[in-house]
Image (cartoon, rainbow, N blue to C red):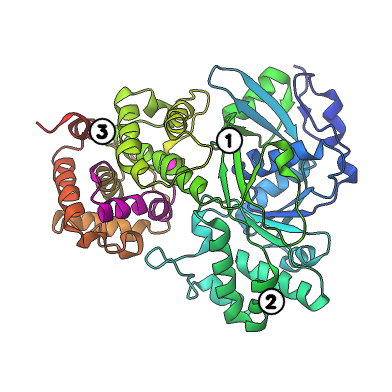
Amino acid sequence: MKSLIPITQSTLGELPEEIARPSYDRSKLTAGIMHIGVGGFHRSHQAYYTDQLLSEPGNREWGICGVGLRDADRKIGDVLKQQNYLYTLIVKHPDGRIENRVIGSLIDFMLASDDPDAVIERMASEETRIVSLTITEGGYLLNPADGEFDLDHPDVQHDLENPDKPRTVFGHLAAALQQRRELDIPAFTIQSCDNIQHNGDVTRKVLLAFAKELDPDLADWIEWEVSFPNAMVDRITPVTTPEDIEYLQNEFGIKDEWPVTCEPFCQWVIEDDFSNGRPVWESVGAQFVPDVTPYEKMKIRLLNAGHSVLGILGSIDGHTTIDGCIADPLFATYLRRFMDVEATPVLDTVEGIDLEAYKASLIERFGNSNIKDNLARICLESSSKLPKFLIPTINENLAKGGSTEYAALVIAAWCYYSDKHTSKDGVKLEVVDEMKDELHAAAVATRKDKLSFLRVEAVFGDLSENQVFTDDYVRMIDALYENPNIARLMQALLFGWE
């Protein structure tokens, strides 16, 4: 058997011709960007855009140094180091076509749990001009009930007491910015790439809240000197599977320990507000705008909420992937009806976007049978996702007298999911959520108090006090607990109750 070609800098010339690879000299790159949270999405999105940019002359200062904060990030760091920080991006088209490209924009990786001082020092260096983040919704440590930073979180308290040995993102950022302030080095930009509406504003609020507790003078300096551009990011990026690794081995004889798969669609809309220069990402397809609010709201309320609608309902019905849900006409119709009747009426006008075409494109993207996006991934940390993706749509519709029944079924199904941890057929469903135990207890109590799940204020706020919504919700709960046939309930909402 022919030996496999490992992905390394020295073996790039041995790769098959159909594998695209960096056309630039990576040895001449410097890391003007440090990125915290080197998961699949970062590697399919920001690193992809930057890889394209580095192929153009005059951009060699924009290489990326990845950062992992937790010991759990050790594995990705070890794999990247072994592969000279190279990896394969597998782009899967709906028609079955697959494009493969080796991405070279990552040039280093640091594990903060091993050496926080080294990470802080690198952030504080003049070379670093942007620190970007993909830390997931839960990483911002916000209380869902009031949207404020959780200063009582144990890791936050640790960082306030041990600012030179931080654990949180914000402890590291504050320590590095403190050094830059003391050394009179211009501040870096902090650029969130997470699926949070006003992600830059949220990052700014959280860091300032932390810094004010740590050092009010530092907080004042950050407020004046640091930019936090809002951005909307979009590219469906499933978790890498063993099959993806085997595909590269069997088709091309390539050994890549951690490739990334994604869809061809890619979007990045950014506010042009940077403290210390920026890459010209617009030359490779990013869009710089004065205000991203309409774009991010559109994406969060349609794409992200749509994922959660399919993830929760589909899991209980027995589906396992997003494309499997969309292949079921009932689920495709239900999702489109939710988008049309409940999500669209509370969206803002989005300049240059045809909403009807955008919604149709989402259905097509979700239905890409080459992207096996697992529903278990979609349902991860739902307690931090739904307060941002779905519940604001419910609240705005209630304020305007709009429909909420399609979303009510999703919330009732989430209650059932949190209670039973199984599909309608008894298949075990994995629940990974920071609030898993609290949600489970509240869901179990539904048997005696039908609104107990809605009374988890940290997630739902005062939604349990709204009679219009609770009427719909209780009707769904009654029907679901009598017979957990999600398809029957979806049909009832779409075509009328018997």
**Which structural element holds mark 2?**
helix
Q: Residues within 10 Å of mark 2 (few under 14, many from 20)?
A: some
- Dot 1 corresponds to which residue? 240
Amino acid under disc 2: Trp
Q: How far apart are marks 2 and 3 (CA)?
A: 57 Å
Amino acid under disc 3: Asp
Give the mark toward the camera: 1 or 3: 1
Q: Which of 456 and 161 is in front in this view?
A: 456
**Which structural element holds mark 3?**
loop
- Dot 2 corresponds to which residue? 221
Q: Can I make out residue 321 in this image?
A: no
> x, y percentage for residue 477?
18, 47
> x, y percentage for residue 36?
66, 55
> x, y percentage for residue 54?
80, 40
- Specify the quadrant of the image occupied by residue 32: bottom right
Is 395 within the magenta?
yes
Q: Considering only order in the chain, which callout, 3 or 2, is on the residue closer to the N terminus?
A: 2
Identify the main secondary structure in magenta: helix
> Where is 203 relative to 405, above or below?
below
- Dot 3 corresponds to which residue? 425
Q: How far apart are marks 1 and 3 (CA)?
A: 28 Å
> Where is 166 relative to 381, above or below?
below
Marks counted in the figure total 3
Report the span colored magenta: 378-406
Identified at 59% across, 69% down, the residue is 207
Q: Seen in the image, is 129 located left or right of residue 363?
A: right
